């Protein structure tokens, strides 16, 4: 089994970022970091929304028919 096939540990990257000292960053570097993090947040939210829409579509397709 390839390493890519194994489940990834969740939250690891975010945990590492939250522990990193920001003292050595300049104001410009902090602004760049914020922009990158905001872009990543937007990417994750977009993926979440697509996954939610996909799940709703699958649930409606495979939902048992109601009998009256």
Image: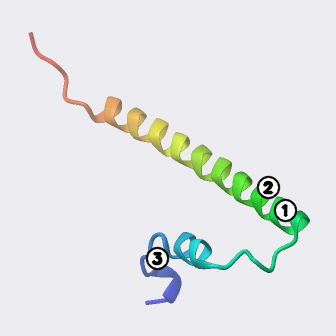
Q: Position of residue 12 (x, y in %)?
A: 50, 76
Q: Which label lies toward us, 3 or 1?
A: 1
Q: Position of residue 58 (x, y in %)?
A: 37, 38
Residue where numbered disc 3 is placed: 8
Q: CA distance from mark 2 to mark 3?
A: 25 Å
Q: Position of residue 62 (x, y in %)?
A: 28, 35
Q: Is residue 22 above or below residue 38?
A: below
Determine whether the residue tagged by mark 3 lies in a helix, strand or loop. Answer: loop
Q: Is residue 63 above or below residue 39?
A: above
Instruction: Indicate the quadrant containing the C terminus: top left, top right, bottom left or bottom right.
Output: top left
Q: Is residue 18 above or below residue 3?
A: above
Q: Which label lies toward us, 2 or 3?
A: 2
Q: Residue furthest left?
A: 68
Q: How many marks?
A: 3
Q: Which mark is residue 22?
A: none
Quadrant of res 36: bottom right
Instruction: Indicate the quadrant containing the N terminus: top left, top right, bottom left or bottom right.
Output: bottom left
Residue where numbered disc 2 is placed: 35
| First of labels 2, 3 by sequence position | 3
Image-based side of 61 in relation to 15, left or right: left
Q: Residues within 10 Å of mark 1 (few under 14, many from 20)?
A: few
Q: Residues within 10 Å of mark 3 (few under 14, many from 20)?
A: few
Image-based side of 24 in relation to 62, left or right: right
Q: Residue furthest top?
A: 68
Q: Which mark is residue 32?
A: 1
Q: CA distance from mark 1 to mark 2?
A: 5 Å
Are the residues flagged by discs 1 and 2 in contact, CB closer than 8 Å? yes
Image-based side of 19 in relation to 5, left or right: right
Q: CA distance from mark 3 to mark 1?
A: 27 Å
């Amino acid at each position: 089994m390839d390493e890519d096939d194994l489940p990834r540990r969740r939250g690891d990257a975010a945990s590492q970022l939250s522990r990193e000292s920001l003292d050595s960053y300049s104001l410009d570097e902090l602004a760049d970091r914020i922009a990158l993090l905001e872009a990543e947040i937007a990417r994750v939210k977009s993926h979440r929304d697509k996954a939610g829409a996909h799940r709703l579509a699958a649930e409606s397709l495979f939902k048992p028919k109601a009998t009256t």
